Amino acid sequence: RISPILSHLNPPVNDDSFTSSFLSVSNASSSDGESSKVSIGGVSLDLKEPKKVELVPFDVIPSEFGFNQVDNHLPQELLHHLRWMMQKDKLGQDIFLIGPPGPLRRWLALLYCQLTKREVEYVSLSRDTTESDLKVRREIVKRSIVYVDQAPIRAAIEGRILVLEGIEKAERNVLPVLNNLLENREVSLEDGRFLMSHDRYDDLVKKKGYSRADLDNLKIVRVDPRFRVIALGTPVPKFNGNPLDPPLRSRFQARDVNSLNAETLYGVLQAQFGSALPHNLIRNTISLSESFKAMELEGNDLFPKLPHFPITAVFSILRLQAVFPDESLSKILSRIYPFHLVVGTEGPKTLESEKNSEEAAIRLVLQKQGFLSSSPQDSRFKLISNAKSKIISHSRRIQISFENAKNSSPLLLETNGGNSLGSSSKLIEMPYHTQLLGEMMQDHIIGSDFCVIGEKGSGKSVIVRRFAEILGYSDDVSPSLFEIIHLYKDMTVRDLFQRRGTHVNGDTFWENSALVRCALNGGIVVLDGINRLHSGAISAIQRIINDREMNLVDGSLILKEEKYQVLRRKMGKTEEEMRVLSIFPIHPSFRIICLATSSSTSNSTWLTSEVLSLFHWHEMKNMEEEWKKNLLRELFPKLNSQLLDRILLLQSNVNQSGRKEGEDSKESEIQLSLRQLIRICRRCSQFPNDLYSTVQRTLLFHFLPVALRDNLHKLLNASGIFEEKHSLVEPQLKVTTKEESGREVQSSVISVEDQDSHVEENLPSGTCQFIQVDDLSMPINRPQNPQLVPKILFYNVPQHVLLLKELMKDVSLGEHILLIGNQGVGKNKLVDKMLSLLQIEREYIQLHRDTTVQQLTVSPSVVNGVVTWSDSPLVKAVKYGRCLVVDEADKAPLEVVCILKGLAEDGQMIISDGRKIVSSDANDSNDREDSGIIRMHPDFKMIVLANRPGFPFLGNDFFSECGDCFSCHVIDNPDINSEMKLLRMYAPSVPESVIVQLTKLFGQLRKMVDEGLLGYPYSLRELVNIVKHLEHFGSDGLVDTLENVFSFDIYDSQLRHHLLKTFQEAGIPLGLGNYQPTISLSKESPLTPWILQEKWKLLDKNTLTGNFTHEQNKKENVVLQLSIKPENQGKNLRGRSMGRLSQFSEFCYSWSVETQGRTLGMTSTPDGSIHILTEDPFEIHSHPMDSRTGQISQSYDVIELAQLYPYYRADQGFSGFSFKDPKNPKIISLGLKSPTVALYLPFYEVVLITGMPNSGSSSTFTVPFDVSLGEEPSGMISPKGIFATTKSRASLHKSIMEDSMAHRNVLLFYSRKSTRMSLLKITEGVDRIPSVQISKIQLEGKGFPHRIVILSLEPLTLMVWMEEQEGKVIQMMGIMEQDSKLRLYRLESEGNKLPDFVFGSGEDRDRVFAMNRNGYFSSSGLLNSIENRISGFEVWGNNRDTKEEMDSFSSFWSRKLGLMLNVYSIQEEERKEGDSKRKERGPSVVIEAVDPLKNSIRKIFIPSERFRMKSEPAMVKQESYPRFRSSLLPIAITSCETEGSAAFLFTDGTIHIFELDPERIKSSLEGWKAVVGSKILEGQNEPKLSIEYDEGKKASGDIKEGKIDEEGGEHFGGNTWKGGSGGADTAGLGGAGGPYRNHDGKHPVHQISDEEKAKVSQEIKERAKAMAKEGLAKRLKEIDMGKGESDLYERLLLQVGREISSLRVILEGVEAKKKERTWLSNQTAGDLDDRKIVEGIVGEKNIYKKRGVQENLPGFQEKPKRLRFVMDISGSMFRFNSQDKRLERLLLCTLMIMESFRGFEHKYQVSIVGHSGDSQEIPLVDYGAIPSNRKERLKVLERMVAHSEYCSSGDTTIEATEEAIKSVIQQNDADDYFVFVVSDANLRRYGIKPERLSQVVTSDPRVNVYAIFIASLGEEAEVIRSGLPLGRGFATFDTSKLPSVFKQIFAESVLKERTSRL
């Protein structure tokens, strides 16, 4: 591919080619000596003396290009073109010169006019060109409309040549107005004239008898026969632009005018540079040009991005080399032809690595010609920074000194300059700046304009200003010699040159722009933000750049100084006479400098070949670290050196992290510009403790993607920058009065009541007031206009006061401020409060999408026909030193608000009416309003408010474009404490429970927004409005009040589904339809009187039957540290079901434990946390208590015990679901200070003592003793569960752990068949390691094979051995702790009436409460607290109600509540649905809460229907009680001590919370009433309001689908058509009695009232329902989908419905942004365009603008994104699915992708393939062919399962990824490419290392490859993810987290796309 290029490296050159005379120009003179004929190669043309000499071109080609333009000395190539043009001229044909960008075509056209002495009318076309620019334009002269002919009309009438340049840039509807003029030489004008061709006109005069006067009266004008048109254009689509309209194209004769050939070019260059430059250099430069030309000829496939190499570049290279012979050629070429800006630098670093790449070919060409250095070199010429520039005489010539790196003597040159050398800039020069200034000065010396390109904030504006000051250009003089024009997207070509206005008398005039003024005065004009302009607008200035000539809109002609003087002498005019003729010279000192951001060059539409050829290019690169350090030290000498080192280290770390090998820096790099570094240092020099927060704010840390946010946090810590610790003391706002000496006179806290009266009107002399927050003190101003100081209601919550403090810090530093955040978070409140505190006057402006640049600065109006301009708030704030608040900055077009960047950074702005804002430190010589200069007041401040970038706001990314010019603050919703405090202040009478409920609800909604499930960010504003309503209308209830906010969302079914589920999880019954809230609390009943049952006698302690030994454990505890994995920390509790929705009862809420196996046990610790033991996986779920809500927190931690016992399964000893079964594992809570649980595993016979999660870790200790009480030793058990000795299963499970003493930290182990017991006393140890005291008991006898009952009497624990059958007491033993020791006591019983279930004692410590099926028991006795002698116990009892037949029974004693909880099931009779006679028995559950101290009982009944499984999802109809699905009895019960409730754990993994404390129930009831509304609750309904409805068509019962209207008309209120609304009997919407819903979506829905719907009979409803089922069956039959398949798909869809909604929200957000319309100008209808007020006055038509979709320029057509999902359907997915459900997650992921991307095929072309050991590419879904129905989508999933089940083992992840990368880019028809590899990370097994996958992921920079691991064996997924580039790997084992992964990826993609468009 490179061989055709290499052949051009040494082209043949004929040294004598320039003198050949194949063609020549000859002139024949008339008798008077003037030429009358010109001939070229035998083609001659008669000449005619021009009427206007100034319109005849001369010296067309600038002298610096070396062409000798005198007759025969023209190059032969040009003569051939001229000869052809003369032929066309003689034939009367119009000419089209087509060729690559550059001035050659224009020079050739003007050269022909010069040779033929033809007058020229020149028009530069652009997309802003309108019909009035081509025909006639209206002006007002002496209050009358005057029509002024434009260039085409003048040329036609006067017989001139019309040159139209830029044909391809004009809009296609504009040029057709010239079609008739070109074809027939006729056109009608708006002033009534008609231009007629000369032959028809002459025919009327000669043959028809018309005189010229007659034709003049008829307004018929003759077109001169010499009128010709020469059009100049570039070929489209090779270059950018609009293709030619076929009718227009057919009217031209075309000629290809390419660059000069090598022979011609060599002759020209040799003649100009032969004496100054080596012959070899000229040849090499020509060879370089020819090589690039050959590369262009290779076509777009080989070199699609290669820019055109213009002929002007050859001359520029040699001119620079001639003046600076020692300068590096590579440096010169990089400035003149910066191909890397377009091609990019992502190509190979060496030629050997990629021979066929585009950049490699370019580098090879450069290397062969000596234009590529082996190593990067600096410029060899540097500006001598200490040289004194001076003005030589009055010619404005400046002496510049250069330091030559090769020669010791400096180079002294003279150049054009300004006339004021006294100003100074902000630039602190470093060696890098000196070098760059030197390169810029080189271009200035040879007369070239240039563009400085660099990152935002890199100092472009400052260095350009310094460059101007060195040369004496200043903006402090009049006229200004230095002007900055801030460009914007909608700026027109006319705006660049002239602005239209009106005089006082109403006459119109044209005012020169800053560019024209600088051209006339010899100044420098800086076009800042040239990348924002359309490429066509940039091209409009090419003539002034190349030729230094301009034809202005008002007819003025501006010429180069030399040509102007020649023309003036030729015309014999004076300077004044030339001005009268509107002919002006361009000063030789005039220069154009452009500024652009380097980020805009990637995939840009503005950096075209044409634009690239206009300027020399200078890149501002990052400074070296040492230079940067010296710069910051000089700027901020007070900054701590250690802080400075940390800041610079951070930037270095940031840059290095973004440039890791193989990493895509576009996605991973975080930019810290020089401007941002300066702002950080400025802040830290005054507030050194703010470094961490300042960096976070500067980089908008809060809105970064998760991966970048985590990476930045690591980089901050690695740089020694850590988060500041904030004071726990709430900050206060104070107002203080101080004397001049600083002594404080008075101080007071600002409260809500006096917040507007903190300003003292009459202060004592010598004192002033200050606002003080902590250590920050700010003076209070004395405003001249107090009415402009905002006054608001503001509550001082901690977070907002801290934000005020941060804002005031910025004000003290003189910073402009940007507040960015969601809507309604208080941005305006904070700003207004700060301004109110400091008494600063405010000007406010709110932007919107229709805001224009003119509206931002001035407002035009017409008074008596005169346009007047009124100052906007911006101008007023600048003038008078007020604070300008710019609200909704993200809503306005980005190009509009970008002009604020210049105002903030440079202190300059040019206003639409021509005035100019200058900074306050500028020279005061022109400080007058009439001078057009507005001096910025030193107190001027600007505060910009904007919403966060991205979805759902979809505004402009203001921060990305202008954020580095402001001190940024992220304003978020307040933290929980601040938010609750704020709400209490707004609504002090609203119950606390409601406040808590609301904050919890909105916190969850905001979390859903962050996860992408919801689009609208619910903010503090809505929350405040809700509580304000409740404060004043509390009886309405929370439910009705919430509808004020959420009624917007009820029509979106998916959104409504998510919201209602969230409301109900928060306990708010919103969305349940018409419900009547009821109270259903159990009634308290008294117990029957107590009766003495028996007595227990305490025997002498010396009569013990066993031996008691005690020893302190001598072994050290085995400490095992269990770290909680990140994915297990703070997991979200899903599936919470609230009970108190429509009914208030004891039931509070429930949730399901997330486990694949069974739940084994539950306990609660004193802090209220609940801890649950699960089987598969073997782990503890720790649920903390939320102190705010009094409920279990929404997040929990998981402790993986499988790390210790990976092979634990319930079948190793788990024998049932009764928590009383001794064979089952047991988890109990200890009474230690820190939350601690003990876990006993009978199978392993090991005790684990586990501290609950603290800072992400949990310490677990094994108790080092053998708890086995069997006769055989149990063997040693390792922590991993490996047996040291083998024994049969029958010998296991001999030890039982008793937990009745656990609250005293004592564990008792015994066996029913053993006489041995062990007790463990656990105490607090050091470093949270407990100390264990072991006591052993050996009883007499051979064991007690009987039932054992444990009684805890506090402090005595009683063990009773009873006979298994008769219940006779065999032995009773008591255990008591005394003097920190355990003692044994023996008791005997006088009876056998011991209870079945015994739990513990009451708070009085002398009673034990128990029960059996026959009654309740209370044992009481007398305790001596000194000697602990127990005289005996009396056992009392009462008979319980035995009428209920109990099927099962379970009991629990709550020490905290003092309640005995009995749960049992009963059988009740109920009527079977649909059968009036048959009855059947069904189970119900009863919870008894017995209070023995009060002798009362409460029974909570759970009706039997609650246990039935129902088909509808729970979120559709929420029940008051849960459905118990597996067993009617719980396996564990525990008390939630901090909330007065009890938790019941059932075998299906559901936990149910019942509130049982009467006081808590009473408090909760009051809060519930506030939620549902007291009016509804008490039946106090308001008077009914009635509305009369047009009943329309009533339901007749004749149910049918209805007819289909083929024409799609609107139908409502009838019963004939299908798809209508508001009717009856047919399928539609909003009506009654129809079979099912149907609507065409085109017409509005007419809804009938609910009353009318209710009138439909039950019979009609049943018939409609049956017909709907038939319709569903019919639809399923159409897609061949059975009922079973439909149900299966529905179940799968239900599992990922939430995730699909989340992903579609993201995709729809992108789509909404794409569909957003922009302003289209030059319209004939719409809104009046402010820029065309004057045009409207004079009567032009194209003065309107309207919203519309901007057509893409050909060559930049928007294309869809191509995505390929590579799914792992290998055997391992099927194999391990039973273990972790990985295959099911893969299927759900695939379903989510198909459902989410369906409907976005025009935007995303999605393909899904699988891979396994059989194949690396298994087609599932082709590109853009997502299955259209459910059956086909289900088949895709079935194929995946089948393949995974039957495929061979193996892994082809690498091969599949490589194949996907190749496939996705096969068709070059997308704007971005993505490959997603979804895998189970099973790579190590097949020897695949993460490094290999990383290489594949980054193998092609065009493709964004991401690896998503949804399963893992051990830590393999995390190992692979960490080995991939940042942001390219994700490990998520939860399907619900996948949308957030895609959101992060697509958010970055959209951001890059938006940036590239800007």
Image: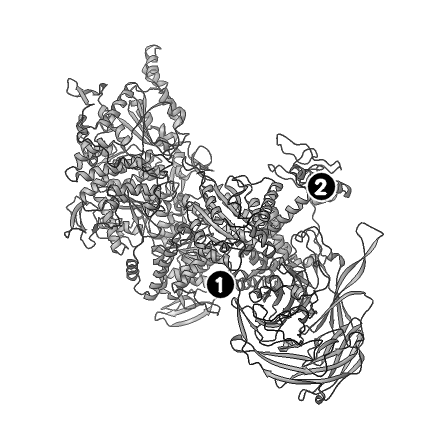
Residue identified by numbered label 1: 799
In this picture, residue 1545 sits left or right of residue 347: right
Q: In which quarter of the image is residue 278?
A: top left
User: Which residue appears farthest toward the right when viewing the image?
Assistant: 1477
Q: Is residue 1786 above or below residue 47?
A: below
In this picture, residue 1887 sits left or right of residue 127: right
In this picture, residue 924 sits left or right of residue 1942: left
Name the foreground residue: 1690 vs 119. 1690
Name the foreground residue: 271 vs 571. 271
Q: In which quarter of the image is the C terminus?
A: top left
Q: In which quarter of the image is the N terminus?
A: top left
Task: Give the number of the disc on residue 1669.
Answer: 2
The reply to whether residue 209 is in sight is: yes
SS class, disc 1: helix
| Residue 1820 image position (x, y, % from top left) | 55, 42
Q: Quadrant of residue 302?
A: top left
The reply to whether residue 838 is in sight is: no
**For mark 1, does the 10 Å Cα neighbourhood hold few (<14), some (14 to 19), or many (20 or more) residues?**
some
Q: Quadrant of residue 816?
A: bottom left
| Viewer-side label of 1, 2 | 2
Q: Tag 2: residue type?
A: Lys
Q: Which colour scheme is used?
A: one colour
Residue at 47% from the left image edge and 47% from the top image edge: 1855
| Residue 1047 image position (x, y, % from top left) | 61, 49
In this picture, residue 813 sits left or right of residue 1530: left
Name the foreground residue: 953 vs 889. 953
Name the foreground residue: 1650 vs 1188. 1188
Q: Is residue 1260 above or below residue 76?
A: below
